[in-house]
Amino acid sequence: MNDDSSARIVADLRSWIAAAPPGARLPSTRTLVAEHGVSPVTVQKALRTLASQGIVESRPGVGTFVRATRTVRPHDHGWQTAALGAAPERGPRLSTSLRTTPNDVVALHSGYPDRALLPERLVRAATTRAARSDAAVGRPPSAGLPELQAWFAAELGAATPAGLAAPAAGDVIVTPGSQSGLSIACRALVGAGRPLLVESPTYWGVIGAAAQARVELVPVPSGPHGPDPDELDRAFAATGARAFYAQPSFANPTGAHWSPDLADAVLDVVRARGAFLVEDDWAHDFAITAEAVPLAARDDSGHVVYLRSLTKSVSPAVRVAGIVARGPARERLLATAQAEAMYVSGLLQAVAVDVVTQPAWRTHVRGLRLQLAARRDLLAAALREHVPQATFELPAGGLNLWLRLPDGTDVRRLARDCEGAGVVIAAGDEWFPAEPAGAYVRLNFSGPDPGSFERGAQVIGAALAALR
């Protein structure tokens, strides 16, 4: 019935559009609901159908308009075929988590927290101050502003046990976000044609960074509590790899949080193999029921290269991260960073260090923990009620729930069906460096409008039932 109603609205609007001039605004959703006696979801489905056909265009917060038809000369880009050569076998693709969506959908796919969870007042005030400072016109040092280097070092130093040497400010390299840091690490520590061990599943960004650097990824099975140290050791022995990338605290996508015993066991393997552990502490500020204690704090011998981002917790507009490394590895990382980006905007660095050194920053992070817990539990309860076929672990931190669906579920089709009903989810195969080990989807509980989680779970449950 819903599909028939949507098709009828599409047909009626096509007739209306045929008589309307380009740029004309379509009747509002409320008007169409009243005229056709259907739900807003049905109307939005019809509008998405027209948009996918190139007939209308949606402008969030403004309305839907008749798309202007332009006749243009087709461009011949065939010359690029020879210039580019063969495509890489694992060419990176745009992740679902980076997609922007209309305001009228339930967005459970994003990799970023909702604006309401950001320290917006602190960021705006810091931006104003930075714009009036020398940072607005000066060139910062290649390794970063000294005060921001010192902050990254002090944060890690606070977790360093007695008897171990805390990192110094000079051990820090500031990068334009953690994705840049991953690219730098792949090029500087691994190199083209060399193997990099990764957890499987793992963060899609390292899969893309490795593909760009022509690094060979070697998956190591990892579950809801982390990898098996014996499997990791076997992978080192079989491949001769000299680096392992991992997210010990609230891994993306699984939410896994390593125990102290597992952390020690992994460090023992890495040291015995004379290798590096690239630790991505992306969710340090998103702890909920457990603390993010970096493995890098347990190592002062240079085996752990530590990556800490502020982009998600401060603001997506402030793309700033820090790499903490010691010895010759730090010099090689810095040289690669200089070749890639020369330096990070001093203005953005000044904003970042201003925000995180304000007393209100700590207050914000404490409050964020409570908000994330409430959102996590709200989505989890809705899923348990409406998607009983799915299983998942309740993460102790991070931004996501990692759902295991019944074997044989076509997760790509499920995602398409959900989107057709106004709910955007991320198919889990994006997070596997090789063939997926099962049917998974990742849902972000930190996105906008937690009041829509119930409807989102209902749509997922109905779509899953229809598939089966």
Image (cartoon, rainbow, N blue to C red):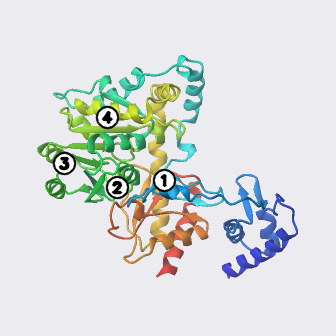
Q: Are marks 3 and 4 in contact (CB under 8 Å)?
A: no
Kindly identify which residue carries mark 3.
266
Q: Are marks 2 and 4 in contact (CB under 8 Å)?
A: no
Say which quarter of the image contains residue 435. Answer: bottom left
Amino acid of disc 4: Leu
Report if residue 292 is visible in the image: no
Amino acid of disc 3: Val
Kindly identify which residue carries mark 4.
333
Residue 258, x across and y down, in percent? 26, 50
Q: Earlier in the sequence, mark 2 or mark 3?
A: 2
Amino acid of disc 1: Ala
Packing grade of label 4 (10 A; few <14, some 14-19, many >=20) is: many
Please state, as top left, top right, bottom left or bottom right, where the N terminus lies in the image.
Answer: bottom right
Q: Secondary structure at mark 3?
A: helix
Kindly identify which residue carries mark 1.
83
Q: Earlier in the sequence, mark 1 or mark 3?
A: 1
Residue 215, x across and y down, in percent? 31, 51
Camera-near label (1 vs 3) is 1
Horizontal relation, residue 42 to residue 159: left or right: right
Q: Which residue is at 58% across, 66% downward?
A: 455
Q: Earlier in the sequence, mark 3 or mark 4?
A: 3
Give me the C-alpha separation between circle 1 and circle 2. Answer: 33 Å
Camera-near label (2 vs 4) is 4
Kindly identify which residue carries mark 2.
202
